[in-house]
């Protein structure tokens, strides 16, 4: 702004200066020319009078006149010249001033000499005898007059530059002060130029629009943040360069990282090859999916390119924890394999015995024995299928099983009563001790749990051993304890006996054949009732299994 104002002021000053200069020059030049002419005319007048009075002797008597004096005869012959030898001078009949004087009585002429800086002015006047007297003088041309004024002009110009500059700065400051002091939040308040009002009105309007838009954006961001913050899944938004624009808390937990810095490269937060490959593929415009191993967890990541006007403007990474899902799938696969295997064993036996009988290779006396084997295997098969059904029912949990108020003590006594004959066969003494305990649970499942625990205590007992079953209410729980004096479980197996189909090798004798699902059913039944199972066992001494049923369960329902 200062520059512009300076240019304007200086331009105006320069134009004014030059105009004044030209005016002064022309006035001065005209004035001096007029003066000179007057002076020459006077000079010529009294010389004419002198010649007419005294002739040549008068001219000879003039000592060094200020102006050059030439006397020219009527025919143009030079009769006298005060500065040159008139005898050698050419005829002056063709000179402009001579012709004018001869015709009109007087005449002026001016001629430039060799250099433009000098000019000769001539004034000729006719005498009574027809001869002409000429007075010449050298005078300065307008150009040399201008040159003579160059230095003062230059000084004035320099002062004009300085003056213009100082003035421009001051003016600019004065003009910009109210503009600088405009409060852009409240543009129309304060002392403002009228010329700026439309502009300021527009700013105020735009301010309002921006505030409105900012409010909307903030609200949308808050919505987005609260949605993404409460998401367990991880979400990362990248720009087209692969730098992190935003992320949610889920990412930090899933990828086990600390908060990335703003615009940090995403490759810094996970340096695995699989991660790099998927991000790079998405940055190339193609959707990609990968499963990452983060410590002991598995995360599935989807990398989606964000395409805008045909270009990849960014990438969205969605990360899910699939550890449980993968584990469940693994368990399901294992369960299916185990079921097939467990079903195949008795079926193979049944088929084998039946084939021998079909081929008539069995003596009639042995038929009952073979038929008994087939019966036993079929029973085992039925037992297995029943256990699988129970387990899958437990898997479906609450959806199909309804909890009711039940008499826990009655169930325990009933189960023990059913198993007593089997125990007696092995000479095993069964002791049962119960307290009246009302419980809120699934009767059938509690029944199966007690049955499996007591059945195992008998199955894996020694001849003439002992089984103690007790049911007590302790503080806020019902405690079911089944203790036996059996073969016990080695510490290494204690953690695994609750797995499906897991059977300790040593106990796989013919008499103690089971499905390997009994304790699994106990575990799932306990889960269904929020109960904890505790196992204590010593090889060759016996096993105690305690199930702690919380009474608070009832209130939850
Ligand atoms: P099973 O149908 O084989 O009894 P379970 O799931 O009930 O299957 O038991 C798993 C394994 O745990 C059994 O094969 C057995 O080796 C062991 N086990 C269970 N209960 C006892 C116990 N009271 N004493 C010793 N070992 C036991």
Image (cartoon, grey):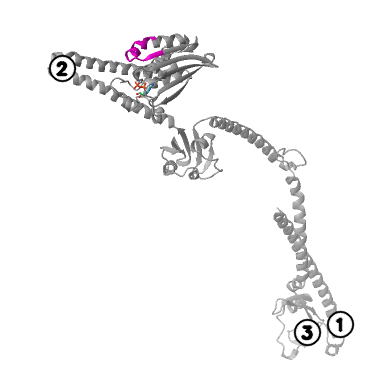
User: From the viewer's perspective, is 403 left or right of 102?
Assistant: left
Percent from the top left, x then y, of residue 97?
A: 75, 77
Q: Residue at x 76, y 83 (%)?
A: 74
Q: Residue 8 falls in which quadrant of the image?
A: bottom right
Closest to the observer, 459 or 410 = 459
**Disc 2 versus disc 3: nearer the observer:** 2
**Disc 3 versus disc 1: nearer the observer:** 3
Q: Which residues are magenta?
A: 417-430
- Of mark 3 and mark 1, the one earlier in the sequence is 1
Task: Check disc 3 and report the residue beneath it.
Answer: 70
Percent from the top left, x then y, of residue 521?
A: 39, 19
Dots 1, 2 in contact, CB < 8 A: no
Cα distance between the residues tagged 1 and 2:
184 Å
Tell me the element at label 2.
helix
Tell me the element at label 3.
strand
Numbered tag placed on residue 357 in the rendering: 2
Task: Check disc 1 and report the residue beneath it.
Answer: 49
Residue 201 magenta: no
Residue 426 magenta: yes
Taking the image in four quarters, ligand 1 sits in the one at: top left
């Amino acid at each position: 702004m200062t520059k512009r104002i300076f240019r304007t002021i200086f331009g105006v000053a320069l134009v004014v200066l030059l105009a004044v200069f030209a005016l002064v020059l022309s006035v001065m030049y005209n004035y001096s020319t007029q003066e000179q002419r007057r002076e020459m005319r006077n000079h010529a007048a009294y010389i004419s009078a002198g010649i007419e009075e005294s002739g040549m002797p008068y001219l000879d008597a003039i000592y060094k006149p200020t102006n050059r004096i030439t006397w020219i005869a009527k025919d143009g012959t030079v009769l006298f010249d005060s500065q040159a030898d008139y005898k050698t001078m050419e005829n002056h009949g063709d000179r402009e001033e001579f012709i004018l004087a001869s015709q009109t009585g007087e005449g002026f002429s001016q001629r430039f000499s060799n250099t433009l800086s000098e000019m000769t002015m001539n004034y000729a006047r006719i005498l009574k005898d027809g001869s002409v007297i000429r007075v010449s003088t050298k005078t300065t041309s307008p150009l040399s007059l201008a040159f003579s004024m160059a230095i003062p002009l230059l000084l004035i110009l320099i002062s004009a530059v300085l003056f213009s500059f100082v003035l421009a700065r001051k003016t600019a400051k004065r003009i910009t002060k109210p503009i600088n002091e405009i409060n852009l939040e409240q543009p129309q308040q304060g002392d403002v130029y009228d010329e700026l009002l439309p502009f300021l009105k527009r700013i105020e309007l735009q301010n309002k629009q921006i505030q409105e838009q900012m409010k909307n954006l903030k609200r949308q961001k808050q919505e987005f943040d609260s949605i993404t913050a409460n998401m367990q899944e991880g979400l990362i938004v990248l720009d087209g360069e692969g730098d992190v624009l935003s992320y949610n808390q889920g990412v930090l937990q899933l990828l086990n990282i600390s908060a990335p810095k703003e615009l940090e490269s995403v490759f810094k937060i996970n340096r695995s090859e699989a991660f790099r490959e998927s991000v790079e593929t998405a940055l190339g415009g193609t959707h990609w999916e990968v499963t990452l191993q983060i410590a002991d967890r598995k995360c599935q990541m989807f990398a989606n390119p964000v395409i805008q006007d045909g270009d990849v403007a960014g990438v969205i990474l969605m990360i899910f924890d699939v550890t449980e899902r993968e584990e469940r799938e693994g368990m399901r696969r294992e369960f299916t394999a185990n079921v097939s295997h467990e079903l195949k064993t008795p079926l193979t036996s049944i088929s084998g015995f039946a084939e021998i009988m079909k081929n008539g290779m069995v003596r009639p006396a042995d038929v009952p024995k073979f038929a008994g084997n087939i019966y036993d295997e079929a029973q085992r098969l039925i037992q297995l299928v029943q256990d699988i059904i129970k387990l899958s029912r437990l898997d479906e949990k609450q959806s199909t099983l309804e909890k009711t108020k039940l008499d826990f003590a009655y169930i325990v006594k009933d189960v023990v009563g059913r198993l007593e004959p089997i125990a007696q066969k092995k000479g095993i003494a069964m002791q049962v001790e119960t307290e009246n305990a009302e419980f809120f649970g699934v009767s059938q499942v509690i029944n199966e749990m007690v049955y499996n625990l007591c059945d195992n205590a008998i199955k894996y007992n020694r001849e003439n051993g002992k089984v103690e079953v007790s049911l007590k209410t302790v503080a806020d729980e019902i405690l079911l304890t089944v203790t036996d004096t059996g073969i016990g479980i080695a510490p290494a197996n204690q953690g695994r006996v609750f797995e499906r189909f897991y059977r300790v090798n040593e106990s796989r004798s013919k008499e103690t054949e089971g499905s390997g699902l009994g304790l699994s059913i106990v575990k799932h039944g306990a889960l269904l009732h929020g109960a904890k199972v505790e196992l204590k066992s010593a090889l060759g001494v016996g096993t105690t299994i305690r199930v702690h049923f919380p009474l608070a369960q009832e209130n939850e329902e």
